Structures are given as structure tokens and as C-alpha cells.
């Protein structure tokens, strides 16, 4: 019996959501080729409406509603990378891409992501909460 992915309610035939890159990029280096491909696959799944949970993604309510981080474990470079994103009504907004070097997310990363989210919501989505 085939397994089904968790999807947003009634996705129907709607088009994939575009990615809105507000900051950062996914490239080699600093990510290895394998980690870059993994990041691309995870982002594609998001675009198709799939809801992900640990270990691939976790919510970040400290940044805002519908904000999450993708978790990329780069076994080649022995680094962990994070992609902070927001699931908007019309796009997936990439708020920050960074190498994780401490147990907690640095305050500066959270502050920058909040600022970018606020600007994105004002410009792209108007009054969407």
C-alpha cells in the first residue's frame, strides 16, 4: 500500500509555490554537493505543499507564525546548516541560510529573520497574518 505525504488541505491542481529568496543562497561551497542537493529536495517538497516535521524541519514560533527551519546535516564538511523559511499564501519565503555553530540559534539570526519576515509580509502579502 503506498504511503501518502501530509499535504495542505485540498491542494487540487494548484501550481507549486515559488521560492522568494530574501537572504542567503544554497551553493557549493560552503555546502557539499550532497548537502546542496538535499536542501534542494527539501525545498521542492515544500513548494509542492508537503508539511514536514522533525528531523527535516521544525517550527520556529519565536520568529513568527508559519516560520520553520530546514535542517541540513552536511556529513562531508561536518557542519549543520539551517534554512529559515516562512510559508506564505503565495510563496515560500527564505528568510535566512546559515551554518549552525552553537546549540541555540544566534540572537542576530533570529532578529534578522524577524525583520525580513515583517518586510516581506508588508510588501508581498499586505495584511496576511
Image (spheres, rainbow, N blue to C red):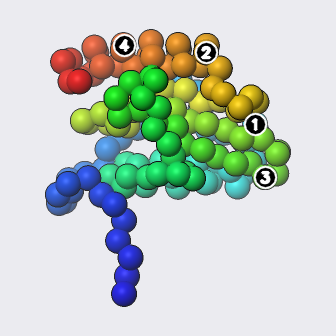
| Mark 3 residue crowding within 10 angstroms, few (<14) / some (14–19) / many (20+) | few
- Quadrant containing the N terminus in the rendered view: bottom left
- Could you say which quadrant of the image residue 10 lies in? bottom left
Side (left or right) of 113 relative to 93:
right
Tell me which residue sits at (50%, 42%) in the image: 58
Query: CA gap, disc 4 to disc 1?
Result: 28 Å
Residue 110's x, y, as percent? 54, 19
| Mark 1 residue crowding within 10 angstroms, few (<14) / some (14–19) / many (20+) | some
**Residue with the mark numbered 1:** 30
Is label 2 in a helix, a strand or a loop? Answer: helix
Sequence-wise first label, 2 or 4 = 2
| Mark 2 residue crowding within 10 angstroms, few (<14) / some (14–19) / many (20+) | few
Side (left or right) of 64 relative to 106:
left
Label 2 with label 1: CB-CB less than 8 Å: no
Picture layout, residue 121 above or below residue 76: above
Q: Nearer the viewer, mark 2 or mark 1?
A: 2
Query: CA gap, disc 2 to disc 4?
Result: 18 Å
Query: CA gap, disc 3 to disc 1?
Result: 12 Å
**Residue with the mark numbered 4:** 119
Sequence-wise first label, 4 or 1 = 1
**Residue with the mark numbered 3:** 75
Q: Which mark is residue 107?
A: 2
Amino acid at each position: 500500500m503506498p504511503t501518502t505525504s501530509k499535504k495542505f488541505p485540498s491542494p487540487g491542481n494548484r501550481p507549486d509555490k515559488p521560492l522568494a529568496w530574501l537572504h542567503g543562497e544554497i551553493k557549493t561551497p560552503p555546502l557539499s554537493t550532497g548537502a546542496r542537493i538535499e536542501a534542494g529536495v527539501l525545498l521542492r517538497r515544500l513548494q509542492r505543499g508537503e508539511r514536514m516535521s522533525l528531523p527535516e524541519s521544525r517550527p520556529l514560533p519565536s520568529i513568527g507564525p508559519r516560520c520553520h527551519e530546514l535542517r541540513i546535516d552536511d556529513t562531508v564538511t561536518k557542519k549543520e546548516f539551517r534554512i529559515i523559511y516562512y510559508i506564505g499564501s503565495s510563496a515560500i519565503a527564505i528568510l535566512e541560510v546559515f551554518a549552525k555553530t552553537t546549540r541555540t540559534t544566534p540572537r542576530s539570526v533570529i532578529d534578522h529573520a524577524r525583520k525580513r519576515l515583517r518586510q516581506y509580509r508588508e510588501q508581498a502579502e499586505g495584511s496576511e497574518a
